[in-house]
Amino acid sequence: MKGGDLVKNNFMSTLFVGIDVSSKTNVLCALDFQGDKLLNLKALNNQPGAESILDSILGCLNSNGLEYVVIALESTSFYSTHIANFLSSSEELLPFKPLVYCLNPKSVANYRKSFVDIDKTDPLDAFVIADFARCGRITSEPWRGAQFLALQRLSRHRLHLVECITREKTYMVSNIYLKFSELAVLDKDEKPFSNTYGVTSAAVLTEFLSLDDITYSSIEDLVAFVSAKGKNRFSDPYETARLLQKAARDSYRLDQVLYEPLNTSIASSFNLIKAFDDEIKVVDKAIEKTIKGINPVEYQSLTSIPGIGPVLASGILAEIGTIASFGSHDSLAKYAGLTWRVTQSGDYSSDDTRMTKTGNKYLRYYLIEAANSVRNHVPEYRDFYNKKYGEVTTHCHKRALALTSRKLVRLIFGLLTKNQIYSSSKVGEIQ
């Protein structure tokens, strides 16, 4: 029996607790199913404060003859982590089958609008959260405990490092353009390097002080430079050197005083990117080690899908927890925010629909990344992506990738619920 079913079948005997979390304090309100306030209190957001909250909840349950407890709190950055983990793992609460939920603040804020002219105070915030739980509005999954939190922190930290690299690359575009304008703006077939941030490109941008050093170098010297830095991986180093020299010749020239500061800034950015890349490799090893001790069967199911490796599988499982928490692939997609709002009035129905994005953004990220990888390995998903890409004239890639991700959710749900591995005959996929 899932947590939601447990509450629905025993709502008259359930205590609904709402906690408004801040960095220093936790404000609690507890309601019975009739909406009567049974408990109001404020405690410090630390271990002694959590213990006093636990004692108060236990006292309220016993004194009112209640058998179950649902505890809801907003997912307030990392400040809600300790209290959620403490209450969900409490042995004293186990007889009351506690369900602890970290709620999306946006969902609670929208529910608050149903109260007319309600003030904005911590006790009233706690009341709104408790009433949100009492009315059965919770659609997220219960807090899953420390072992999933460990994997989740690793996978989310990896995403943080990836975002740091993206941010640094975006930042350094202006410096690259100032030093080597053509390298930053040339069309793909005219660029000497396919990756502006690759090893050879980085060497060009940092080891040549000015563009004249490239322009007036002999083509033989440039070919030797490109071959050495590219470790002889260029299929036509002469053509690469020729395109590089032409790009240097056509680029804007700067006052000599600017080249050294730009070189320093660009080199610093490349050093940061390399440092982040090195840290990602360390985190990847930690992720692979952690996941194998948590969900070996589900991990094997996901990694059996071509294109999904240890990192993507771990990121997905860290956010899902266990597939038993979801009743259908629709509920899993909704949890990830891979659903679309319908815009319809009368006979009109808009073709331009927006993704809700109100679910778990980390799960959505890993599912979209997984779909992008799977389409490069599985013909069925590549064909599906191409079909969706060709159906519209705007946002082609984003739309096609999002729809491919939604298709992948069905496959993932089917494999995990049946404990199967992937096969090209669609075993496990729920239509």
Image (spheres, rainbow, N blue to C red):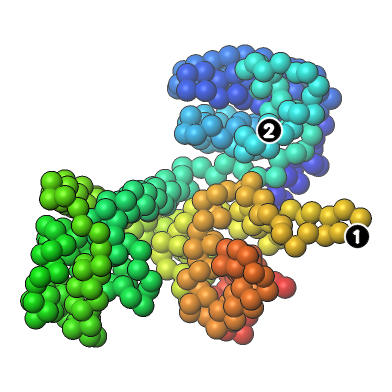
Q: Residue at x 60, y 63 (%)?
A: 395
In the image as oriented, which residue stretches furthest toward the right? 346
- Residue 123 is marked as none
Q: Is residue 213 left or right of residue 335?
A: left
Q: Is residue 126 left or right of residue 208?
A: right
Identify which residue, 306 or 418, lies in the foreground.
306
| Residue corresponding to mark 2 | 108
Query: Circle 2 sits in a helix, a strand or a loop, which is it?
Result: helix
Looking at numbered disc 2 in the image, what kind of residue is underneath it? Val
Mark 2 or 1, closer to the camera: 1
Residue 166 image point, x, y percent: 37, 53
Q: Looking at the picture, how far across and down is residue 68, in whole percent? A: 71, 33
Q: Residue at x 78, y 55 (%)?
A: 342
Residue in view at x 62 percent, y 50 percent: 357
Q: Is residue 327 visible?
A: no
Q: Is residue 109 above or below residue 228?
A: above
Disc 2 packing (10 Å; few <14; some 14–19; many ≥20): many
| Lower sequence index among marks 2 and 1 | 2
Q: Quadrant of residue 415?
A: bottom right
Residue 44 in the image: above or below residue 104: above
Residue 260 in percent (x, y) is at 13, 49
**Relative to 98, is 367 on the left or the right?**
left
399 in relation to 64, above or below: below
Q: Which residue is mark 1?
A: 347
Residue 352 appears in the rendering? yes
